[in-house]
Image (cartoon, rainbow, N blue to C red):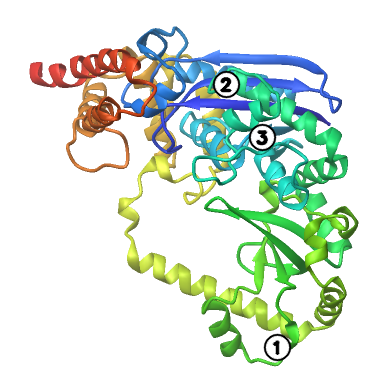
Amino acid sequence: MDLIFYDFETTGRDPHWDQILQVGATKVTKEFNEIEAFEDRCRLKPGLIPSPFALAVNNTDYAKLIKTECSHYEMLRKLEEKFIKWSPSIFIGYNSINFDEEFLRHSLFRALLDPYLTSRNNNHRADLLELLRTVDFFFPNTINVPTNEKKKKTFKLDQIAPANAITHLAHDALGDVMATKQLAQLISKRKPCFWRSFLDGANKSQVYNTLSDEKIIFLCQTFYGKTTPISGTFLFTHPVYNFPVLFDLNYDPQDLIELNLKDLRDIYISGQKFLKFVRPNKGPILLKKKQVEDSWFFNSININEFQKRSEVLENASFFKQNLASMLLDIAEYNKQEKELSGSQEDIMAEETLYIGGFPSHEDQKLKQQFKNESWSNRYKLCQEFSDKRFSYFGLRLIYEECPNTLPSSVRDKIERSVEDQLTSTNKEKWKTCDDFDKEIEIIENDSNTNVREFVFELNDIRNYFKEIYYQKRIKN
């Protein structure tokens, strides 16, 4: 299967409220020979305030942000067309599962396109950052990992690439793509067995096959920058969430196997997390014993004891039933707590990709019609969606792309809503004009910043926002 390396530059870090500004991608063979490259940039969407910090990092000046000819929707359509043409492939990015993938999904969702483009139609996805962390944990010095001012290892692309003699234009989408591809090529040569596990982990079916075939599996998980190893045995799939559940072999099952359900639950929620979870749709890198036998880590564990514990678990069917019941109880309790603590009224359409359900068959057909219709005919389609989220997204798209085709009353209502959101002085989920001013002030007052000369560009952008949001509001 071919590989697609891709990267986005964005207006900020929140996929619900920020947007993609630039996309870079390259399709290569499994031998890393380039087949085709793709790069595009768009202007800022109406009704969105970017983060000055983000603009400074990715060097998006006034001209790029405001004057670029291509709109956000037009860029998404071109990206969608290219990715469909390149499918099926494995989509690989750098910190992509938690960042780029979320931006892609939410952007396509709001554009009434398929948000699961990279995981449907036999496509798979993987994150090279996790491979680098895993390789470095088990076999340090395979690659050069620089340290930051706190003497801690940093895996930031703009630092780890040059540390491995890879020169690139950092924080440019296509530049970051090329650096990611070269790092992948480096790992594939120096640790080919890890590279194969990385590609296998992109395929959900292969993840389950590996877990079922191996009595003991090794992997790494990273939380808040700290990478920790897991030596586990597959037990079952979660009774609610359907992802694989492992027993952490650092715990002795003999200490737990005779406990009743209540005692098991009390021990688990008190902090003894003897169960670990694998997200099969997030490219887990599952390693077999022979792949880590030569590592420092393997010498630090008692593999014979781990094998005994795994054999105990293999026949402990009643214990597994208790564990499944425990997880079911915890999931039900968490659901009730969530319902009691938060009102669904606080959740806005932009935040409902994972909680609002899939479109009905009829709405799916309407989405396809919307995609193919002219702007002048799309307003009527917006009235036909049964899911009000899609009606809302459709109207916003028309407002952003071709507002004159909307009835004046509808256009004025959206415009007032946009102005209210962006000129708010409250703490909002999205960036406001006030937030933009405060971030510029932080940049101006930071003596250590290296982007102070960029403040001139930011001030031009600020003046633009004042003109289109505040002055228009005064006239109205």
Residue 55 rendering spot, x and y as whole percentages: 40, 22
Residue at x 33%, y 61% (from the top left corner)? 342
- Is residue 432 shown left or right of residue 176? left
- x and y, in percent, of residue 346 in the image: 31, 51
**Is residue 4 at all visible to an observer of this figure?**
no
Between disc 3 and disc 2, the foreground one is: 2
Viewer-closest of 271 and 349: 271
Q: Which residue is mark 1?
A: 255
Q: CA distance from mark 1 to mark 2?
A: 51 Å
Say the numbered circle drawn on residue 173.
2
> Marks 3/2: CA distance?
18 Å
Taking the spot 40% from the left edge, 70% from the top edge, the residue there is 337
Taking the spot 61% from the left edge, 24% from the top edge, the residue there is 176
The answer to whether residue 46 is above or below residue 205 is above
Q: Secondary structure at mark 2?
A: helix
- Which part of the image, by quadrant, shows the C terminus? top left
- The amino acid marked with disc number 1 is Asp
Is residue 116 in view? yes
Give the mark nearer the N terminus: 1 vs 2.
2
Are discs 1 and 2 less than 8 Å apart at CB?
no
- In the picture of the structure, the residue carrying the numbered disc 3 is 118
- Within 10 Å of the Cα at label 1, are there few (<14), some (14-19), or many (20+) other Cα atoms? few
Disc 2 marks a residue whose amino acid type is Ala
Secondary-structure class at tag 1: helix
